[in-house]
Amino acid sequence: MYWRLTRSDYERKKGAGNKQAFRKIVDAGPPPGLLAYTDGKPVGWCAIGPRENYPTLERSRVLARIDDEPAWSVTCFFVARPFRRQGITVQLLKAAADFARKKGARIVEGYPVEPKKGRMPDVFAYTGLPSAYRKAGYVEVLRRSETRPIMRRLVGSR
């Protein structure tokens, strides 16, 4: 819900309130993201949808739109601890691109965080890492901040 609300609304609804709001989005459809499964068990999550679904992106100076082209956005991930560093994020990024293409998107964007030195604690990598995006066919198109590139993948034609 972080990307879907103002900061004050997110903080005010933290916990159960945000969980309830997200449940409403899931129930209303369309799906707000994708799940990754291993042996029939969910092990990962990726939020994907039209950029307009994420007002926090629209308000961000660092992650502001780079042009007038409509884009879908990958905003966050979760991979269960036992399954991290096994390529689940890369697979989710590829699936997100395919999902968006099937829904009519031409461009999929992501907003990973670049570790300043060495490894980053997993909790701070919830938007993904640029290396995963590159492995999934995304390219960096703009960087307004040392640690926040905007990555894109073209998935459809005009």
Image: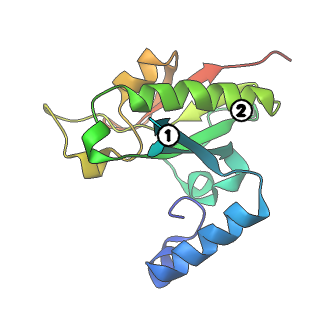
- What amino acid type is highlighted by mark number 2? Ala
The residue that mark 2 highlights is 100
The residue that mark 1 highlights is 40
Residue 19 point in image, percent of width and height: 53, 73
Q: Earlier in the sequence, mark 2 or mark 1?
A: 1
Q: In the displayed structure, does residue 29 sit left or right of residue 42?
A: right
Residue 9 in sight from this viewpoint: no
> What is the distance, in whole Å, between disc 2 and disc 1 at their CAs?
23 Å
Where on the picture, by quarter, is residue 154?
Answer: top right
Considering the image in quadrants, where does the C terminus appear? top right
Q: In the displayed structure, does residue 152 sit left or right of residue 148?
A: right
Q: Is residue 14 above or below residue 149?
A: below
Residue 107 point in image, percent of width and height: 69, 26
- What amino acid type is highlighted by mark number 1? Gly
Tell me which residue sits at (68%, 45%) in the image: 49
Tell me which residue sits at (50%, 40%) in the image: 40
Q: In the displayed structure, does residue 49 sit left or right of residue 95?
A: right
* Tags 2 and 1 touching, CB below 8 Å: no
Tell me which residue sits at (19%, 35%) in the image: 116
Residue 55 point in image, percent of width and height: 64, 59
Instruction: Nearest to the eye among marks 2 and 1: give it.
Output: 1
